Image (cartoon, rainbow, N blue to C red):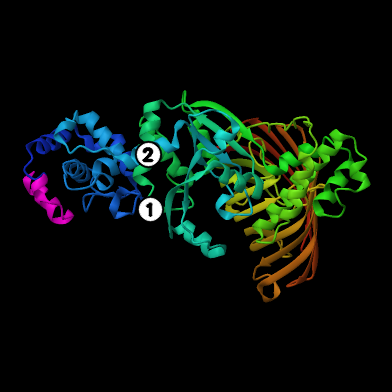
Amino acid sequence: MKVSLVFLTLFLGLPSFSYANNPYLLELQQQAQRLNLANEPLWKRLLHYQTDLTHFKKQSLITSKKFFFHPLGHQNLKAELEATLAQFFITKEDDKHSAQCRFPARFQWLVLELKIDKKQLPNRDCKDLQQWLKGLAVENITLVFPVAYLNNPASMFGHSFLKLDRKENNTEGAQLLAWTINYAAKTDHERGLKFVLKGLLGGYQGQFTLAPYYVLLKEYTDLDNRDLWEYQLNFTQAETQRLLWHLWEILAVEFDYYFINKNCSYQLLSLLEVARPQLNLTAQFTVDTIPADTVRVVIKQQGLLKKVHYRPALSSKLIAKAALLTKPQQAISKALAMGNISLNHPDVNNQEPLKKAQILELAADYLSYLNAKKIKNKQKINGKRAYQLRSARSQLPLKTPEINIAIPKGRPDEGHAGNRAQIGTGHDGKSTFIEIAHRWAYHDLYDNSQGFVKGAEVEFIKSVLRYYPTKNRLKLEQLELINLTSLSNYNSFMKPFSWQVALGVKQIRFEDQQRHLVGRLKIGGGISYYPSKNTLLSINLLGSVLLSPEFRQFTAFGIGVGVRFHYDPIPAWRIALSAKALQYLQGRDHLSYHSQLKQRFSVSKKQALILDFNHQQEFGHNDLSAKISWQFYF
């Protein structure tokens, strides 16, 4: 034991006389060894000690050396625990830099487990820590989930952060001032392919940060137009205190960041495990960590969920307010927001006071929506017009009816899981086949949309294998690396651009009657319209690039048009009709057609039945195919 203390002294450069011959320290270290505290779950959680991606090496996910007292503390749990105990006896450190004040979660746990006599340690006030905790004034912990946002690769699967609900009062204004805990990669604003590759390969460092809730609300609900779900958790006061102590320890340190698994949601789960060590959250995510899946895991914990609150995006509020007015009145609001008419225009002044107030409120909100788009595109906003609209509304001393925004059916935690397996059988126009498929993540346009963004499709690494019994042949039918689609609702106030992109390989039949594997890039853009809450109509211009030795110069390029119609008689049943025509102009002159009738019956949240009928004319073939499949979500 004395040898180990000398080793610590040499490496840490600490004054050995302060603790090297302290018999009480030796007693505590020996007691910790007898109790095997270094292998206790909470100690591992406090050090963020886990297996790496290869599952061969165990070490901390924290890369900052200042977080550890022992040179091998990121790998050696026992050495770090003994070094931590030794640090508690240092007398010459000021409060701010002392181990007791820098690592209060470690200190309080070890005091409890070893029944440490604090009188034998230097007395520490930890004024900075106490002032910080007082400023946070935390009463409850809330897990917040902003829904998926397809225009940012880092947010395609949604996001999550923690809100520290304040003690003072429970008013809306007080909660907007609450602090939030966010974890994100330090990307230096990099974007594009470099951003994606570095995020996948661990090229960034991640860090916890604090920000006022109203700042994140502005970003998510106004700028990104994302709905938020707030899940207030049922932690005890002691558990909340431990979470905050540990947050103090890790705010200034860096972690290895991986977009696929060691991401924002994963690290938030590790914080919740510190608060309540018996939770088994991070162990359920080894290969990938999808934010929506982490929310489901948290909510499944017995007794952890206290209540749920839905916070709509600015666009949702805008549509709800517009529904209270007639079409002509909505047109007046738009004209006011865009500055096409003045506040003294007869169409405004001739309205009865209540309707005038509603028109002005809608105009102000619509201008906020337009300005948010300009802010994202770094364009100049019309602040003067916004002030004029708000000022005119304040001069009408009456209260407008509260808007009624329908809470979406199915919360994010109530949706299907992201991974999906499939088994089916069918006929491809020539032969009968048996098919097995797997999709890594995480939702397509035919899945049950409850708990997901309407009209959004995000799929990564979808593989399909087919076995032909008559030929005794197994073939790769399809491998789709990425498939993204956004069919946002086009209406009088918001005119979003629908788009789609897909990249992969797929079997196509050619003139030799054989099916060949062809590389494929699909892109498209257009508009989508929702005539009712359970109906979708979409039309898009399409582009297609095919790669195969079957084409001149190895490439075929086509352009065309596609239409899509969805109808849900009930949430569990979707009927989808689609058709597309593509004229190939290079590589091989050819006009192809494809039409499809697809139906999905959700038997449960984890299982669905799919019926798929296709008619296709391509490269001289006119094929009818049919398939029945059973899908499993996990």
Give the secondary structure at mark 2.
helix
Which residue sits furthest bottom? 553
Does the magenta portion include 14? yes
Residue toward you, 629 or 316: 316
Residue under pointer 2: 131
The 10 Å Cα crowd at callout 1, few under 14, some 14 to 19, many 20 or more, is many
Q: Quadrant of the N terminus?
A: top left
Question: Circle 1 sits on which residue?
Answer: 254
In front here: 148 or 57?
148
Q: Residue at x 65, y 57 (%)?
A: 376
Question: From this viewpoint, is residue 84 visible?
Answer: yes
Nearest the eye: 122 or 195: 122
Foreground mark, 2 or 1? 2
Residue 307 % position (x, y): 55, 26
Residue 156 within the magenta-colored segment of the rendering: no
Find the distance from the CA under tag 2 to the CA under tag 1: 24 Å
Give the side of residue 174 with respect to residue 447, left or right. Answer: left
Q: Which residues are magenta?
A: 1-18
Residue 88 location, quadrant: top left
Q: Position of residue 162 (x, y in %)?
A: 49, 39
- The three-letter code of the residue at mark 2 reads Gln
